[in-house]
Image: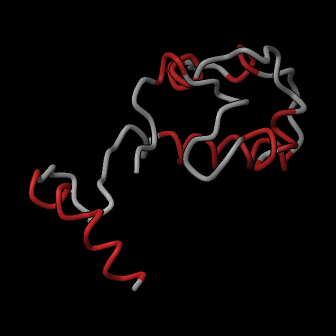
Amino acid sequence: MVNINNEQSYSLWLDRWARGVPTHSFPKIFSFKKKKTTTLVEGKLCTHLHNLFHIPLAQQAHDHDLQLVELSESLDSWSYIWNSRNFSVAKAYMLPMNLKLQRS
């Protein structure tokens, strides 16, 4: 499973990352956004809320912002279907055969 490969190409609001699409998961904070096309890396590098959002934020919207920050800090990690960050040719080769055996 891949969470994020290139943060520069992911939309902070419209792409699926971490737990889903932020516009659906965090509708309150989305309602205060200034720019719909903010990339994930722009959001992570932003140091002042007023650059991303219309201020003042409602308390629930601020809580959503804190949750988004927490989620974005755990991004850009890879793991394979066999729950390892290490690639294995043997495991990749055997995967289709193991899936067929499990279905039989």
Residue 30 percent coordinates (x, y): 83, 33
Residue 74 percent coordinates (x, y): 42, 46
For the point 73% across and 19% down, the residue is 52
Please tell me which residue lies in front, 73 or 88.
88
Horizontal relation, residue 83 to residue 65: left or right: left
Give the image quarter of residue 66: top right
Give the image quarter of residue 14: top right
Q: Residue furthest bottom?
A: 104
State the quadrant of the C terminus.
Answer: bottom left
Horizontal relation, residue 27 to residue 52: left or right: right
Q: How many numbered discs, if any?
A: 0
The image shows residue 49, relative to residue 76, as above or below, that is: above
Q: Residue furthest front?
A: 104
Q: How is the image coloured?
A: secondary structure
Give the image quarter of residue 65: top right
Horizontal relation, residue 80 to residue 40: left or right: left
Horizontal relation, residue 59 to residue 80: left or right: right
For the point 56% across and 24% down, the residue is 10
For the point 79% across and 18% down, the residue is 36
For the point 75% across and 18% down, the residue is 50
The image shows residue 86, relative to residue 98, as above or below, that is: above
Residue 40 percent coordinates (x, y): 56, 25
Residue 79 percent coordinates (x, y): 30, 52
The image shows residue 82, relative to residue 13, as above or below, that is: below
Please tell me which residue lies in front, 99 or 48.
99
